Image: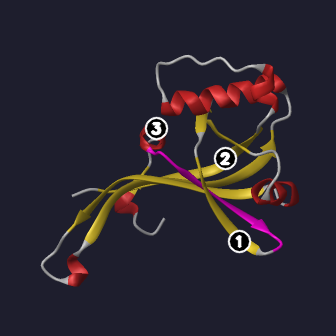
């Protein structure tokens, strides 16, 4: 990382940033080239491994891209605030972000699919419990990204 003064090195802090983010952008490659898609997400961080869960339609461009090339990158950012300056080059944006790369894979086990959906709901509705019917679980695609590496960055004034 070029700006070491902005790097977040503590794993717990990086997970805290993810907790605040509403959207995770997934970077894929398909026959048309690079492709970025913003997605709702859930995650778990266990024994030093970050796994992100996503859901969507059972067919489409992102799933075709994942099936073609499992290597992906991801980025989530939050806490945006414009920091105005007295001249144009003194303006900046405060932010927090987490980004990384990993391997995407489709989740086919119904139990793991439901767990992924539970993690997504936990991210957006903490403290609430949700039940999914077998038909609901079967009606969506769930995929996960296991992070090979990830970093955090922050600028606050």
- Is disc 3 in contact with disc 2, using a CB cutoff of under 8 Å? no
Q: Is residue 47 above or below residue 78?
A: above
Between 30 and 152, the one lying in front of the other is: 30
Residue displayed at 81% across by 36% down = 107
Examine the structure image and report whether residue 106 is included in the region drawn in magenta.
Answer: no
Q: Is residue 65 above or below residue 109?
A: below
Image quadrant holding the C terminus, namely bottom left
Q: Which residue corresponds to mark 3?
A: 19
- Is disc 2 in contact with disc 1, using a CB cutoff of under 8 Å? no
Q: Which residue corresponds to mark 1?
A: 34
Q: Is residue 112 above or below residue 81?
A: above
Instruction: Tell me how far mark 3 sits from mark 1, CA to CA.
Output: 27 Å
> Which comes sooner in the sequence, label 3 or label 1?
3
Instruction: Tell me how far mark 3 sits from mark 2, CA to CA.
Output: 16 Å
> Which comes sooner in the sequence, label 2 or label 1?
1
Residue 97 in the image, given as x and y percentages of width and height: 45, 54
Q: Which residues are magenta?
A: 21-31
Q: Which residue corresponds to mark 2?
A: 147
| Element assignment for label 2 | strand
């Amino acid at each position: 990382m070029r700006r070491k003064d902005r790097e977040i090195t503590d794993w717990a802090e990086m997970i805290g940033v993810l907790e605040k983010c509403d959207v995770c952008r997934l970077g894929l490659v398909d026959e048309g080239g690079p492709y970025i898609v913003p997605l709702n997400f859930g995650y778990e961080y266990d024994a030093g491994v970050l796994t992100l869960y996503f859901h969507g339609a059972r067919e489409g461009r992102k799933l075709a891209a994942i099936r073609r090339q499992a290597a992906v990158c991801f980025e989530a950012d939050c806490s945006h605030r414009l920091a105005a300056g007295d001249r144009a080059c003194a303006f900046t944006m405060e932010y927090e972000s987490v980004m990384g790369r990993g391997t995407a894979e489709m989740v086919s086990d119904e139990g793991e699919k439901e767990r992924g959906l539970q993690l997504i709901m936990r991210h957006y509705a903490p403290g609430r419990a949700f039940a999914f019917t077998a038909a609901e679980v079967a009606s969506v695609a769930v995929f996960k990204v296991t992070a090979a590496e990830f970093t955090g960055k922050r600028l606050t004034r």
